[in-house]
Image: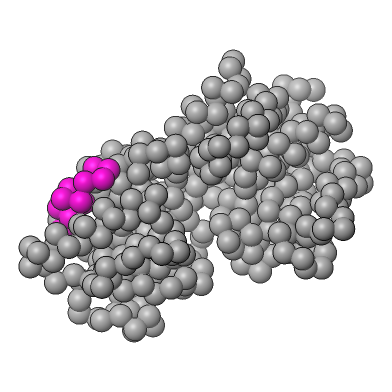
Amino acid sequence: MKILFLCKRRPQSRDLLTRPYGRFFNLPRELSDKGHESYLLLLNYRNEPSVRIENNGIVFISESINPFAPFRYYARACELIKSIHPDWIVGFSDTYFGILAEHLGRKCGTRSAIDAYDNYESYLPWFKPLHLRWRKAIARATAVTAAGPQLAAFLKQSRPGKPVYVIPMAADPGIFIPQDKTDCRLKLNLPPEKKIIGYGGSIYRNRGMKTLFDAHEILKDMGCDIDLVLTGRKEKNISLPSSAKWLGYLSDDQIPTFLNCLDVATIINQLSGFGNYSYPVKLYEAMSCQIPVVATDTPSVNWILKSDNRFLARPDDPHDLADKIRKSLTLGRVDYGKQNNWGQSCEAFQEILLRENLATI
């Protein structure tokens, strides 16, 4: 099969041309390894030159938004479709690309697929016209996939009588593995003997960060000598406790080092239109490093952790979070059992594309 993927160049703020990662890279790469032709058309929100390269069996094409040629990306997509005649057009990374994939598929008589890893409607809850267009695209697309069953069930409301398939997230291979804790702490200048709980991700109020800060204070009041170390983008004007250490925004190649510094990794969220359908890749990464995790018990995270109450803390309850962290500090490395990988996710994705190919012949 020939498959054209539509995606922004920097999903989750990481450049797919220079640091390819996640489902946006690994699904096309795995399909290429299986003998399919993968084209990844990237929209660059920065005014940078157009790029076309081939790497890892994928043809990467990057087009920038240009105030003098705002539809260049759309025109390039149409040119590609005419020249390669793809069997599938797949929308990745957010609402706009799903809508565009379905539109181009309908316009050009090509099968379209939409892949969602979050509830994109929660990003701009007030933008109702966009949500309506998104739901129409979900209803019309040949196939729709989601990062977990809760999100799949949510999307299926816009697609009655048609399936939404689950393609789980995974940690990138060969990177997120157990490493020596002392060595990792030396690299990040962290104390080798202290107990450290960590958080990596967006440090925003709407993620429930106050619950984590309060839990750390509770642990300190109990006499626990524990450092709280954070990394990630910090919301403007959010106040960090004086006892917390913020490492700033670590580069993605430093994240495995950071995780392996920790005695407990925390995954904090809230019950919300975003949190209920979020499948944090940081959770998959920490589990692959065999680090004890304590995560907010949202429906999606409960599914990832298979309802294991050792690792699940009640939402907005700093006392329960503190209690779960305290107990997890004694665990050392944790064997979470066999974890999903991108090869398995790609097998499932390929099966869906082949099945729908046959169904629409």
Q: Residue at x 28, y 55 (%)?
A: 210
Compared to 60, does 348 lie above or below? above
Colouring convention used in this rendered image of the protein: one colour
Q: Which residues are magenta?
A: 314-326
Compared to 130, does 318 lie above or below? below
Q: Residue at x 61, y 55 (%)?
A: 11
Residue 104, picture quadrant: top right
Image spot of residue 61 (x, y percent): 79, 58
Q: Residue at x 64, y 28 (%)?
A: 132
User: Is 157 positioned to the left or the right of 96 in the image?
Assistant: left
Q: Is residue 154 visible?
A: yes
User: Is 325 positioned to the left or the right of 300 in the image?
Assistant: left
For this orientation, the residue located farthest to the top is 161
Is 359 within the magenta? no
Q: Residue at x 38, y 54 (%)?
A: 205
Between 165 and 173, the one nearer to me in the picture:
165
Between 87 and 338, the one nearer to me in the picture:
87
Count the numbered circles shown: 0
Image spot of residue 20 (x, y percent): 62, 62
Please state, as top left, top right, bottom left or bottom right, where the C terminus lies in the image. top right
Compared to 14, does 121 lie above or below? above
Please state, as top left, top right, bottom left or bottom right, where the N terminus lies in the image. top right
Residue 277, picture quadrant: top left
Image spot of residue 48 (x, y percent): 77, 68
Between 60 and 30, the one nearer to me in the picture:
60
Image spot of residue 173 (x, y percent): 51, 60
- The kind of secondary structure the magenta stretch mainly shows is helix
Between 247 and 15, the one nearer to me in the picture:
247
